[in-house]
Amino acid sequence: MVMSPAEYAKLQRFNAYVGARLRVPHKLHGDFVAALGGDEPDTKLRAWYAEVDAEVEISREAIVPDVWKWLDARFKAWAVSTAVDPEWAKIEAWAKG
């Protein structure tokens, strides 16, 4: 999808990540950063968002009606599956509860 710089800037006001199809609102991103913790959670999340966006672009999977629930479930699965140190134990607890 091609958008003008003005359209992109408008989307960035409301979203922490703007991809081809995925938009991650600032509040949701902040929740994920807090849950992820550790070193450079923002960088890790943005790389993960790009992967998810690419998958959705190829599959054409519908993100609607609620990106919050849709992405939250994927975040929890991703965060738990990538757990490699004790810092991730809090994410597992958060994901379960």
Image (cartoon, grey):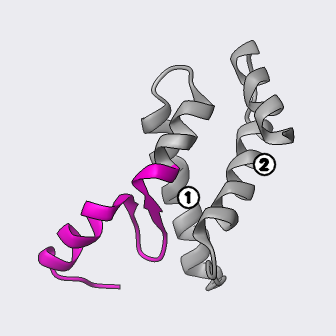
Q: Is residue 43 magenta?
A: no
> Which residue is located at x 62 percent, y 78 percent?
63
**Occupied quadrant, residue 67:** bottom right
The amino acid beneath tag 2 is Ala
Q: Residue furthest top?
A: 86
Expressed as whole percent of the image width and height from the top left, the position of residue 45 reads: 51, 43
**If you read the primary sequence from the N terminus, does the residue marked by circle 2 or circle 1 appear first?**
1
> Which residue is located at x 79 percent, y 22 percent?
89
Counting labels gives: 2
Q: Residues within 10 Å of mark 2 (few under 14, many from 20)?
A: few
Q: Residue furthest left?
A: 6
> Which residue is located at x 62 percent, y 74 percent?
66
Q: Disc 1 on helix, strand or loop?
A: helix
The numbered mark at residue 51 is 1
Q: Residues within 10 Å of mark 1 (few under 14, many from 20)?
A: few
**Occupied quadrant, residue 83:** top right
Expressed as whole percent of the image width and height from the top left, the position of residue 96 reads: 86, 40
Q: Is residue 60 above or below residue 86?
A: below
Expressed as whole percent of the image width and height from the top left, the position of residue 71 reads: 64, 61
The numbered mark at residue 73 is none
Q: Disc 2 on helix, strand or loop?
A: helix
The amino acid beneath tag 1 is Glu
The region drawn magenta spans 1-28
> Which residue is located at x 61 percent, y 86 percent?
60
Q: Give 95 or 40, whichever is nearer the viewer.
A: 95
Q: Give 44 or 73, whichever is nearer the viewer.
A: 73
The numbered mark at residue 77 is 2
Side of 3 where 68 appears, left or right: right
Expressed as whole percent of the image width and height from the top left, the position of residue 62 reads: 64, 84
